Amino acid sequence: MESGQRLGWGLVGTSTIAREHMIPAINAQPDSQVVAVTGSDRARAERYAAELNIPRAHPSVEALVADPEVDVVYVSSTNERHHGPTLAAARAGKHVLCEKPLALTLDDAREMVAACRAAGVVMGTNHHLRNAVTHGTLRRLVREGAIGRPLAARVFHAVYLPPHLQSWRIDRPEAGGGVELDITVHDADTLRFVLDDEVEEVTALSANQGMASGDLDDAVMGVMRFRGGVLAQFHDAFTIRHAGTGFEVHGTDGSLFGEDVMTQAPRGRVFLRRGDRREAVELDSHESLYERSVRRFNAATRGKGEPAATGEDGVRSLAIALAVQASAREGQRVAVEEP
Ligand code: NDP
């Protein structure tokens, strides 16, 4: 891409996330636009392109990555189809923003990161929550020592999977369904981001509360132990309609409460409590988490900074989610593999 020209984004996957969030976010930037799409079903990709004003639908991933107007490949197909397209994009010298979880196995995820690094292209993982003003503020306050030494964290990310998404997530293990790869992976990344620390080991119990089928879990609770000693409790589910979401960090000198913060929409509040005194923390204005993700990614392709979450971050969050899944299945605590 010539400097000053717009970055062309090519989409792998005729997905809901691209339709509802990423296409508007890419096209909202002055320096990028969606130029092409491909999917496993050619007719569906053509309909998707026509409906969303995408100039071209390609018949295959190979054709999309060979398109000279495609500079960045955004991979948002189902989870088992992130690996192949990422390798193909890297081979073609295209930057990659990949959805979470990066892959179904750590080896595949590591291979994706290595391929992008070897090709000299930027790779990001679309962990949107890092872009929220709420989580950025929580991270800053923890770093500044507003709560002293962090001791514990709690993430409430038990939501109701909307009917239009009640498909492969609840009935296709081979596509990477299940609550751990869908939601716990986000908790893992957000906890790492806010606490600026790494998870060493996890323990978890999961359940099937009537939405998922077969061996897939639709609810999980557990604890992650961080290197620095923080214990983080999490509750993730597809089955809880009325709880709302939250993210708390409790330290020696205070507690931080993020309310309504594990969301796709830019919203939520942060409170700091010391003793009986609870104050609302002033936040910069809320901004689309996905627009911010694309802006950071576009800048990274021009050598300015890094994507909000890198490929390595995606490997780490996957390692934690897989450890949670293994712990729940095996009934024991599991060490998190190093990336
Ligand atoms: P969808 O179920 O909407 O789409 C996933 C894939 O399913 C599509 O790419 C498409 O594959 C296929 N598909 C679409 N319509 C149909 C249909 N009518 N019949 C059969 N198959 C169809 O998934 P999501 O958008 O919810 O998730 C996609 C990815 O994005 C996942 O990896 C998910 O984890 C991630 N995600 C990330 C979020 C974030 O905030 N970071 C939020 C939501 C999802 P194809 O085009 O190849 O044919």
Image (tube, rainbow, N blue to C red):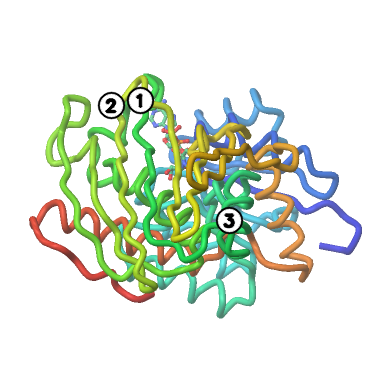
Return the residue at label 3. 97
Q: CA distance from mark 2 to mark 1?
A: 5 Å
Percent position of residue 311, x then y? 51, 66
Q: Does the CB distance between marks 2 and 1 fall below 8 Å?
A: yes
Instruction: Check disc 1 and give the amino acid type.
Output: Tyr
For the point 36% across and 64% down, the residue is 230
Q: Secondary structure at mark 3?
A: strand
Q: Residue at x 64, y 48 (%)?
A: 10
Residue bearing the label numbered 1:
160
Mark 2 or mark 1: which comes first in sequence? 1
> Residue 239, labelled with which disc?
2
**Marks 3,1: beta carbons within 8 A:** no
Q: Please report the residue visible at 8 percent of the width from the left and 57 percent of the height from the top.
A: 330
Give the number of the mark in front: 3 or 1.
Answer: 1
* Residue extending furthest toward the bottom: 118
Decide which of tag 3 and tag 1 comes sooner along the chain. Answer: 3
